[in-house]
Image (cartoon, helix red, strand yellow):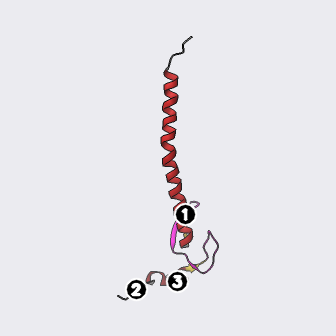
Amino acid sequence: MSKNHRGKGIIEKYRHGRGTCPICKRTGVKIVYERDVESKKMNICKICNVGLTKKEEAKKAKQAVEEPKAAAKVEVKAEVKAEPKVE
């Protein structure tokens, strides 16, 4: 089957969607992925987009692991405070 419409969306963009990536500073790459970087919307290249996605996933996974540990520490401290002192 033919692929007649491949790339049609970027043909309308300035320089066919090619330019300099603001993150990695590479030139002549397609910058068609719009992301929030440092609270600004930027168009970035595919490699930087994947890198940012992996960093976000790693941060979420780390938080998911740390949340139960933090909750367990709070419970242990609460139990220690509830016990009366024996003298």
Give the residue at x 63% y 70%: 24
Residue type beneath disc 1: Leu
Q: Earlier in the sequence, mark 3 or mark 1?
A: 3
Quadrant location, the C terminus: top right
Residue range corresponding to the magenta coloring: 20-40
- Give the CA distance from mark 3 to mark 1: 24 Å
Q: Amino acid at mark 2?
A: His
Where residue 12 appears, x then y in whole percent?
Answer: 48, 83
Q: Residue at x 55, y 75 (%)?
A: 31
Q: Residue at label 3?
A: 16
Can you give x and y, in whole percent of width and height, for residue 58 in the image?
Answer: 53, 56
Q: Nearer the viewer, mark 3 or mark 1?
A: 1
Q: Quadrant of residue 14?
A: bottom right
Q: Residue at x 63, y 75 (%)?
A: 26
Q: Is residue 66 magenta?
A: no
The x and y percentages for residue 30 are: 54, 78
Q: What secondary structure prevails in the magenta region?
A: loop
Q: Tell me the element at label 1.
A: helix
